[in-house]
Image (spheres, rainbow, N blue to C red):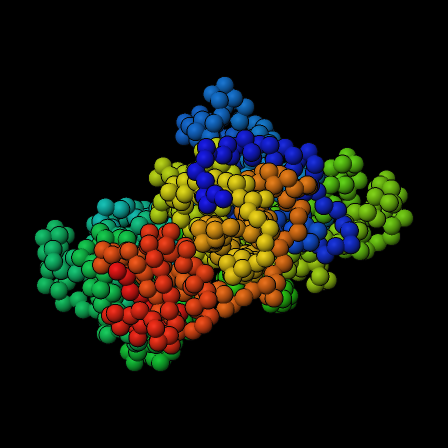
Amino acid sequence: MVVVSIATETDHRKIEEKWKKKWLDAKIFQSDPDSREKYFCNAAFPYVNAPLHLGHGFTYTRIDVMARFKRMSGFNTIYPFAFHATGEPIVGVATRLEKGDEKQRNILLSSGIPEKDISKFRDPKYIVMFWKKRIEEDMNDLGLSVDWRRKFTTIDPEFNKFISWQYRFLKKKGYVVQGTHPVVWCDHCKSPTGDHDRLQGEGESPIDFTILKFKFKDKYICAATLRPETVFGQTNMWADPEVEYSVVLVNDKEKWIVSEQCAEKLKEQGKTIKEMGKIQGKEMIGKYCTAPMIDNEIMILPSKFCDPNIGTGLVTSVPSHAPYDWQALVDLKNNPEELRKYGIDPEEVRKIEPISIIRLDGFGEHPAQEICEQLGIKSQKETEKLDKALKIIYKKEHHTGVMKDNCGEYSGFRVEVAKEDVKRELTRKGLADAIWEPTEKVVCRCGTQCYIKILENQWFLKFSDERWKQKTRECLRMMKIYPDSGRKNFESTIEWLRDKACARRSGLGTKLPWDQEWIIETLSDSVIYPAYYTIAKYINEKGMQPDQLTDELFNYILRGEGDLEKVSEQTKIDKKTIKDMKKEFDYWYGFDLRGSAKELIPNHLTYCLFHHTAMWDDQTRWPKAMTVNGMLNIEGQKMSKSKGNFIVLRDAIDKYGSDAVRITLMDCGEGMNDINWTENDVLSWKSKLNSIYHLITDNYNQGESRLENTMDKWLVSRLENHIKIMTQALDQTNNRTAATEIHQMVNDMSWYLKRTEKPNQGVVDYFLENFVKLLSPFAPFIAEEIWEKLKKKGFLSLEKWPVFDQKKIDDEILQLEESFKKMTEDIKEVIKLSGKNDKLHLYVVSDKELSHFDEGKSFLKKELAFKEANIYILSDPKKYDPEGKAKRAKFGKPGIYVE
């Protein structure tokens, strides 16, 4: 019998190619409705503008493990895939190449595109078809068990008809409306820029800043803030002396001083702006302006943290509660020469003291000062630390802060309440206005930095509709979320989600059916497409034409509305095919599991819930479960092209083999925590899979036929525990927990072979057959190869998953053998300390221990090189115990004496 062979390494890539072809040729992952319970799982489809990377591999393998597990568990399972091409990204690639962008060209070259083919990528449709083919190949190489009959792209004319039906229905229900709203806008594309149309800033959205107006002669110096309630703590104004500010006439009423960039943004936000002149920042330094609400004269001081691209380019200072303001004031007080440069008496600045206006548990009078000291901040140049300090204080004050007695009628108000009330009062009195900004910098796929534009007569999804929100809350309540800690993220998104632009003027996709100048944007046509999977095979195989795919057809199949005879006559599709399509949809939908990364909860995944509750009142069509995973780190760092640690999935498969990549990804982590991929881990798993291959194939159908002994029962008991743990873990998408059992099974088999002089063939074969089944979802290629080597018929991927049997577990034997293992390690330590290993004497307290340990005497002699091994029960008056070691014995921990 072989414990773990280190024979010539298995040719993993050859095995993978072999089984990939066999699976595809036999079409074993194609599933149609039958009498079994169905399981429909899917993942967010890939965008076809680049190769799949290791992060895609992580998400897609997580769902494939579930698909394979459910398929083996007797469910009629489908795992379909399609390709996302909507929006700006693909057109952006083509446009950048057309302009001779070297960076884009180098990206394609680094993706393995030959120099001679680069010019072809100037055609957006070529890009789609190229990456569609490559990605499908990569998915097959990864071992995803996909039913490819159901594939499509989001720019297929047939799919466009499906989306047109969806949006006509949403408009009819009042969920798509025309209105005036702030949107993230690309001036180059002349369109709103959704999350998936961005090079930078995914997840960022418009947020309204309050513009505070400070009287300055016949003008107003304007400062934007997210915290209008802090007006009571203002001590000074900040301006950048090197910036040239604009003086503009706003709505033919007031003269404002703002940055040039701010003036341009205000034009896009419904204000009439007329340029009146310029004023250099340094011209204002040392002068005074009047702070709104408190009506105090405050000095204008120099600062470098005023960004002309954010807000108005001027900042009001509240040093007691704003870390940047506190540190900038400290820096100025410590630099009198800087003040004298602008004709400011340093003594005047030293007199400026922070004004505490918010009571905050856990902090003293000036929270900003305390947090700066805690984080060791010494200069306003330490922006990373200051950003951290700002987030800590702002969050704590917003949620738990209370306004102090020096805040007038707002004294005693919670900060989160005072914020809105103060803003309203300032606005009513003409002391404040508003400007919209993105929450962080946003860059469109075309390379243009975006800003917030207030659009009139734009089409929006009315996510603010309370009835719609309530239906979506109910949908979420009924769903399973894996891990459940992600549920609060969905709940939060449902609450804060506002109306969202659903169309743009450029890019690829489906034209808005009632307004052909607009194209439905990338996050708005990717929410109910799993329903299209159920009928796509008919559309593909029967070559249905777009004009046959009418609203009446979709209503009949997907909503059960209309008359079959009329639909058939109108579409020229025979009644049997239409009935089959309806049967298919009714059988499969709604889906049972959808998987994606946690970063998509604030948009794509929550939108998916909203759209399902809008399209179907029938709750059986709503999503049943979603699983969200963390992001992928490489060797402890975020994966990024700029860091040089970006791993293309195909490269990883070519280097390590698909099985090693899959099981390493699954063993890296679970839940919503970010996972960490290391080369050491994948090389370790590659080696372990090689060992598993030989462990199983070398020991199967060996040994002898005999009655079961205690070690046989121990091995079967261990197997049943593994089946139980893995089944429960996989059902909850806890793949790391399940993958850990693979390690343990190798250890168990190896231990059994060492502990047993004559292995029981029936027990060993039973263990190994189940072992390879349990391995299959994680490493399906090598598992299939092993199954074939065991001379088993059919595909392992279609075999039955092992069923846990509590009756086969002997807890007493498990406990005794665990004690035996620990005792073996203890004996090794005794030998190490004493230097003796001629004779071994063990003292146990029970007959059960005596029997179990006595069976292991030959193992102890062989393993530890003793010439003699003796085991005594504590009650034996004739026991040999020259040093009184017997009295130390406890159940599960024998006394040990060596000589």
Q: Between 437 and 738, which is closer to the camera in this rendering? A: 738
The x, y position of residue 193, in whole percent, is 51, 45
Q: Residue at x 29, y 70 (%)?
A: 881
Q: Taking 31 as reference, is 861 above or below it?
A: below
Q: Residue at x 86, y 45 (%)?
A: 576
Q: Between 135 and 96, which is closer to the camera in this rendering? A: 135
Q: Quadrant of the C terminus?
A: bottom left
The x, y position of residue 100, in whole percent, is 44, 25
Q: Taking 313 as reference, is 226 above or below it?
A: below
Q: Residue at x 49, y 65 (%)?
A: 813
Say which quarter of the image contains residue 364.
bottom left
Q: Taking 888 as reference, is 328 above or below it?
A: above
For residue 538, side relative to residue 209 (left or right): right
Say which quarter of the image contains residue 850.
bottom left
Q: Residue at x 74, y 37 (%)?
A: 540
The x, y position of residue 18, in whole percent, is 60, 32
Q: Extreme front residue here?
A: 878
Q: Extreme top residue here?
A: 116
For residue 38, side relative to residue 398 (left or right): right
